[in-house]
Amino acid sequence: MTDVSSYGITARLPRGWDARIAKRPDPAGDPAGPSTRAAPEEGISTRSAPAEGDPPGPLAGTEHPVAHLANFPLPPVRGDYGSGAVELMRADDIFVALVEFEPEAASTPLFSHRGIPRFGVNDFSPHTMQRTIAGMCGAQAFFNRNGRAFCLYVVLGSHALRAPLVAQVNALLAGLEIDPL
Amino acid sequence: MTAAIVALGVVVGLLGVLVVGLLRSHADVLRALHDLGIGEDDLAAAGTAEGRRTAGRRTTRTTGEIRMVPGVAAPGASSSLGRLVDVSGVDPHGGAVHIGLEGSRGLTLLAFLSSGCGSCLDFWRAFATDEVEQVPGRDTRVVVVTRGPEEESPSEVAALASDRVTTVMSSAAWDDYDVPVSPYFLLVDGSRGVVGEGAGGSWAQVVDLLRKAAADAGLALDDDRPRFTRRDLLVGRDRELRADRELAAAGIEPGSPELYAPLHAAPGDGADGEDGAR
């Protein structure tokens, strides 16, 4: 197990997992400013929270920290919700995106769940994908932790074989820590 | 007249003796320098740890009896073959990066580069262009590893880094793999560790060396297989990517009004596409 930490987010990674924790580019264009390697079609955008139940879309970006965790090699360019990466997934692959929103959102009903959630096999659906890919499925949850608001988005490489993958996801989430700002 | 010719012959003879003496003296000096291990190109000057660290700029180094020509890295004191350690560090903007190598699928090319190394420039340039796609193997990914922010300038690395490859700043990775100098390359297999290592003067040269290293290690680079999988066929990924590329090349981005224009509108026919189709 390896701990990866940045911007107050710490993930305990199993062997062979990839991780990136970064921010979007500085809107002022400062090359040395905070950055995440975002897909070009996903511009810097809204600070407002998405509607519950909506699949993550291209306009659901954030300039707050974004963590990507995956048990496969992450490509250098990805959207906040994994576009560019999930298309490369195989049946036993897992992609986890932890996208932070503005702290004020933590007190809104959408983010009212306290603490890092866990998923059951029935939480995953092929329709909870930014772009539907045959055989794959996703799940999304909103929560707050230590005054910070997050969207947790998970994609599994196989809906039919999701049970063992969900167990791995929950084990990963158990090692996730979020510090106060 | 005779006296002049004799005098000229004497002068020429004296000059000949002088030249021979100078040549012998020069040969003695060179021999003495050689015995001291000092070459004309200062080959013996860069053997220290600091020399290794800055060898990208210095480009010369001695390893025992091996003398390297400028621009080509010497082999490390201990080989990294078989070594398998994940790479952890930060990106040039301060975010966390962890490259999981243990058990990962496919091959990973770790390119150890420096922002101040002149011989690294060709690699920084190649990684920002389609040339990076020449890396052998469909699933081979390229990861640039520089020293950490305590030894490298993040802003300089950010200016050189390309979005086509992952860039991580990690001094620990250099130490874990005993990287002797930059540029230096390690080809890592997720189950076998480092299967090839070395350096080259250009990206094309390194690509060639990588193919040989992979072949020597018995790794199938499957370049001859179709560039799509069964899943690609089922989900139409290849077609979708091609369509996206062609639309982008035509200046049509997501949300562009052209995407919502009526399909059969005749020129000058207004917005009523159905009428135009008749």
Image (cartoon, coloured by chain):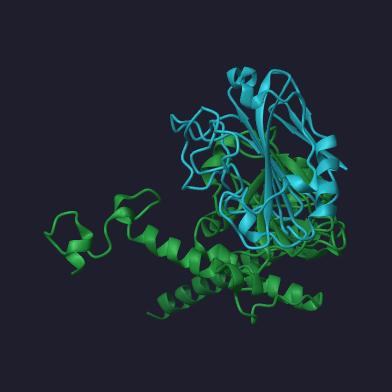
Q: Is residue B221 above or below residue B81?
A: below
Rendering quarter of residue B225:
bottom right
Most foreground residue, B23 or B171: B171
Q: Quadrant of the C terminus of chain A?
A: top right
Most foreground residue, A147 or B143: A147
Identify which residue is drawn at 75% across, 73% down: B214
Rendering quarter of residue B32:
bottom right
Identify which residue is drawn at 58% across, 54% down: A84
Rendering quarter of residue A115:
top right
Image colour for chain A is cyan
Q: Is residue B1 above or below residue A90?
A: below
* Whether residue B246 is visible: yes
* Whether residue B265 is visible: no
Q: Is residue B247 left or right of residue A55?
A: left
Q: Quadrant of the N terminus of chain A?
A: top right
Q: Position of residue A119 (x, y in %)?
A: 78, 41
Identify which residue is drawn at 39% across, 64% down: B246
Most foreground residue, A181 or A131: A131
Image colour for chain B is green
